[in-house]
Amino acid sequence: MKRVSLAIFVVLCLVGCSAWKNKHKDETDNWRDDKFYTEAKLALSKHNYAKAIKYYQQIEIRFPYSRFATQAQIDLAYADYKSGDTESAISAIDRFIKLHPNNPAVDYAYYLEALCNFNGDLGFLASYTGQDPTERDPKAERDAFEGFKELATRFPNSKYTPDAIQRMRYLVDSLATYEIHVARYYLRRGAYIGAANRAQYSLKEYPQAPANEEGLLIMVKSYDALGLTDLRDDAERVMKTNFPDSKYLKGDVPNGRRWWQIWNEGSE
């Protein structure tokens, strides 16, 4: 009787284990590389980035020599980027470029990495606080600029280069505005050397940026406050040459004052 009971117990255990295994069986166990890739693309098109990332990773793990493996690496980076995980995206891109420097998609890899930096510095809180991007640390923007620049230099005929150039123009304005923002801050506090240096840096690094109009005003006011009349007059000449229609130069100046002395707004 005991033997019969034991046999029944064993059978029940086996049946239970089999049922549990079937219930928790991974549906992807028998998938081939093309199936993983198709499902990953489908998940990506539906904005299910977590699932897409999982499937792309499985291609790399299970089928490292598959014809889909290389493409899965760059697609994984894109899925990471779209999910908001720019750190993982950049890591994946750097690995792709290192492993496949001559791949036809390497120009896209450079473009995507620059995009990660271009968009990645906005941040969750900034979108809700309304913080001016030019008031934040511009490291990501500088990295984005260098990334777009490298793409445009190495792949001038890439289909991504025109967009990269447009973004570079935006970044030049943004980076110059940041420098002028800092220069204005120094000017308010009487740190005239720092104010002049930051404005001069912007003028040198981003000579075409509109923000340099105010930057030259800051240089004139700073050099005047420091008693550096030659430098002040040089900055004034540059101001009048490059921005002849500047609002700072317009209007009557009362009581014999110089034009920059009525522009306290430039230091506010």
Image (cartoon, rainbow, N blue to C red):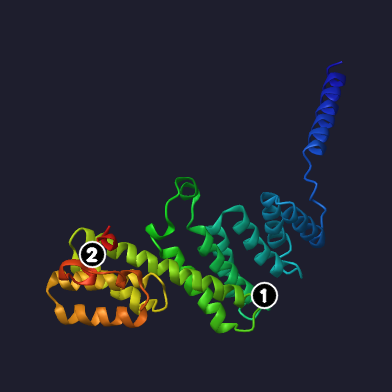
The one nearer the camera, 200 or 263, is 263
Residue at the (33%, 62%) spot, across then down: 181
Label 1 Cα neighbours within 10 Å, binned few <14 / some 14-19 / many ≥20: some
**From the viewer's perspective, is 209 left or right of 198?**
right
Locate residue 122, reporting x and y percent.
49, 55
Tell me if residue 245 comes above or below residue 23 in the rendering.
Answer: below
* Residue type, mark 1 in image: Ala
**From the viewer's perspective, is 239 left or right of 89?**
left
Label 2 Cα neighbours within 10 Å, binned few <14 / some 14-19 / many ≥20: some
Q: Which mark is residue 105?
A: 1
Q: Nearer the viewer, mark 2 or mark 1?
A: 2
Q: CA distance from mark 2 to mark 1?
A: 56 Å
Residue at the (28%, 71%) spot, across then down: 217
* Residue type, mark 2 in image: Ile
Tell me if residue 120 comes above or below residue 154 in the rendering.
Answer: above
Q: Quadrant of the N terminus?
A: top right
Q: Quadrant of residue 100?
A: bottom right
Locate residue 164, reporting x and y percent.
57, 73
Residue at the (77%, 45%) spot, across then down: 26
Q: Residue furthest top?
A: 1
The residue that label 2 is drawn on is 262
Q: Quadrant of residue 160?
A: bottom right
Tell me if residue 37 comes above or below residue 125 in the rendering.
Answer: below
Q: Quadrant of the C terminus?
A: bottom left
The one nearer the camera, 29 or 209, is 209
Instruction: Count up the numbered dots.
Output: 2
**From the viewer's perspective, is 267 left or right of 169?**
left
